Image (cartoon, helix red, strand yellow):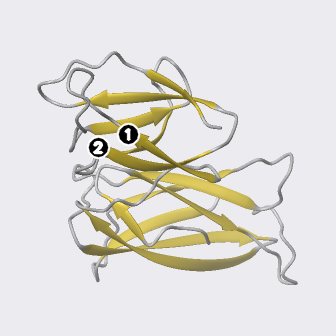
Amino acid sequence: MGCQSEVAIGQNLVFSVVTHDNTGEATDADADPIYRVYEDMTAAPIVTGTMDIHDAANTTGYYQATIVCSVANGFENNHSYNIYVQATVGGATGGISFGFIAKTDCSCPTGPGAVQVTYVLTDSATTLPIADADIWVTTDIAGTNTIASGRTDASGEIDFWLDSGVTYYVWRQKDGYNFVNPDTEVVP
């Protein structure tokens, strides 16, 4: 299972799992795997869902899901969370779990890509950094497919994991500022 160990509240957590048959060979599951997210030692999950097959043309048994780690979804600062994933392959059911911590002050990079990119937000009039601005990245100019999000640090910076050679659209928001959104960026 692939998952980061920390996530900033307000960001998306993308996690993955590879399903196998009883010999250990990567095999597509009989149905999409299910996941349940538990806070600390609670018995009831705060988020549940199913994972989607990812890049089926080039992979076998590779599933991903995205969770919005927001206060509205029940995530709290410095709390521990466990994701339990269950899948059935060839009639046999198995499970795996992974833990992470949610933080309000995390500078954890988010995004599905392979290249860590630092986005810097400055005031166009003063060139000073803009801290605590909400930033989100989409794959479309309409802003409907958000793949990463977070908040700028004291230096006006935020890190994302993006793919090289791809055009992304960066959206910015902070009280007292009027940004021209989106900012179009191509990852080198």
Q: Quadrant of residue 149?
A: top left
Closer to the camera in the image, 1 or 170: 170
* Label 1 packing within 10 angstroms: few (<14), some (14-19), many (20+): some
Residue at 44%, 23% in the rendered image: 183
Which label belongs to residue 156? 2
Q: Amino acid at mark 1?
A: Val
Task: Indicate whether 188 appears above or below 76.
Answer: above
Left or right? Give the position of 2 relative to 45: right
Label 2 vs 1, first from the N-terminus: 1
Task: Indicate whether 38 appears above or below 145.
Answer: below
Residue at 51%, 64% in the rendered image: 35
Labels 2 & 1 near each other (Cβ < 8 A): yes
Task: Indicate whether 15 appears above or below 121.
Answer: below
Mark 1 lies on residue: 120
Q: Secondary structure at mark 1?
A: strand
Residue at 45%, 66% in the rendered image: 36
Residue at 37%, 18% in the rendered image: 181
Q: State the image coordinates of residue 32 (x, y, percent, origin top left).
A: 66, 56
